[in-house]
Image: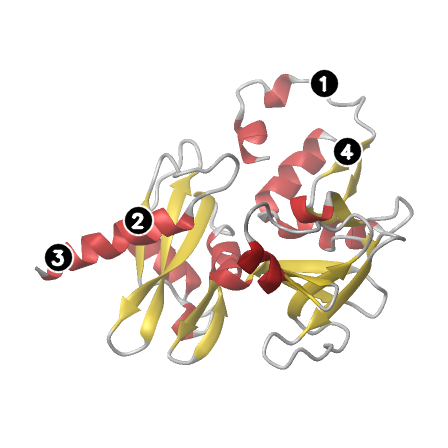
Amino acid sequence: MQDLINHEDFETTDLSSLRVMNSNFAVQPDWIRKAVAKAMPDTIQVGTYGMTEAAGTVSTSRLDDSYEVRTGRCGKVLRDWEMRIVDADSGTDCEPGTRGEIVLRGPNMLKGYYNAPDKTAEAIRDGWFHTGDIGSVDADGNVMFHGRMKDMLKVGGENVAATEIETMLQTHPAVKLAQVVAVPDPRYSEVPAAFIELARGQQSSEEELIAHCRGKLASFKVPRMVRFVSEWPMSTSKIQKFRLQTQLIAEMEEGQG
């Protein structure tokens, strides 16, 4: 989405023929929503939630949902799927609107991971697939994705979602994309650090971006350091956060040496 909007031909391309777009504005920086809405004012925007292990889509917006719901949530669960939001520690079902792990059951669910029985046994328990995703379902049945459980930081005993910090950083006009990782800290065990790709033609500094978060996030959630990147370490389609984390920890250890 970001590369599309920043492409040199985006503003001059006629997009009026697009009728429906799976934009997932609910999990996108707000500047993306504004840019796409301006370029495609007559396009119906929808949100979805899904994954490879579910053979694609699990929930999606209805076309007659309000604009606020279609752009602020990830839709309702499809007919053949069952979804529960469970407390990761107790395994009990969460109340509507409460965050927990998304677990799924349905005919399109994977049977197992290839040649990985231990991974399969960890993920599929009592017929339910444990996604490792943090989500919630509101009283109207609308799903929301809040990040990955492995992207949770433990700052002085407090659980902190990397996505919350990334979303705040991406409200800064100079930030194209933010990724947050945990780095060791002698007092808090670990603290957040941010990697930033700046928007084209924009400038900012570590101090400015940290100050942008102060007063808007709890103090223990504010990034302790910021590094700027022009390229991301990628797998086939995803940013490899572990490589960013390893790089920064090595830099910190070298500085202490």
Q: Earlier in the sequence, mark 3 or mark 1?
A: 1
Of residues 68 and 49, the one drawn nearer to the viewer in this rendering: 49
Q: Which mark is first along the chain, 2 or 4?
A: 4
Residue 50 placement (x, y as % from top left): 71, 48
Q: Is residue 168 left or right of residue 95?
A: left
Place of residue 216 in the rendered image (x, y in percent of width and height, measured from the top left): 48, 67
**Nearer the camera: disc 4 or disc 2:** 2
Residue where numbered disc 3 is placed = 255
Q: Are marks 2 and 1 in contact (CB under 8 Å)?
A: no
The reply to whether residue 219 is visible in this rendering is yes
Residue type marked 4: Pro
Q: In which quadrant is the N terminus drawn?
A: top right
Q: In 3D space, how far apart are the residues under numbered discs 1 and 4 (Cα atoms)?
A: 12 Å
The residue that mark 1 highlights is 14
Q: Is residue 193 left or right of residue 42?
A: left
Amino acid carrying label 1: it is Asp
- Asked if residue 188 lies left or right of residue 146, the reply is left
Q: Amino acid at mark 3?
A: Gly
- Counting residues from the start of the chain, the first of labels 1 and 4 encountered is 1
Q: Give the crowd class for mark 2: few <14, some 14-19, many >=20 residues within 10 Å.
A: some
Q: Position of residue 39 (x, y in %)?
A: 69, 29
Query: Image quarter for residue 207?
Result: bottom left
Q: Nearer the viewer, residue 209 or 1?
A: 1
* Residue for badge 2: 227
Q: Give the residue type at disc 2.
A: Arg
Residue furthest left as drawn: 257
- Placement of 45 over or under 172, stated as above or below: above
Point 75% across, 78% down: residue: 95
Q: Residue at x 39, y 37 (%)?
A: 202
For discs 2 and 1, the disc positioned in front in the rendered view: 2
* Residue 132 visible in the current orientation: no
How far apart, in angstroms, are the residues tagged by discs 2 and 1? 37 Å
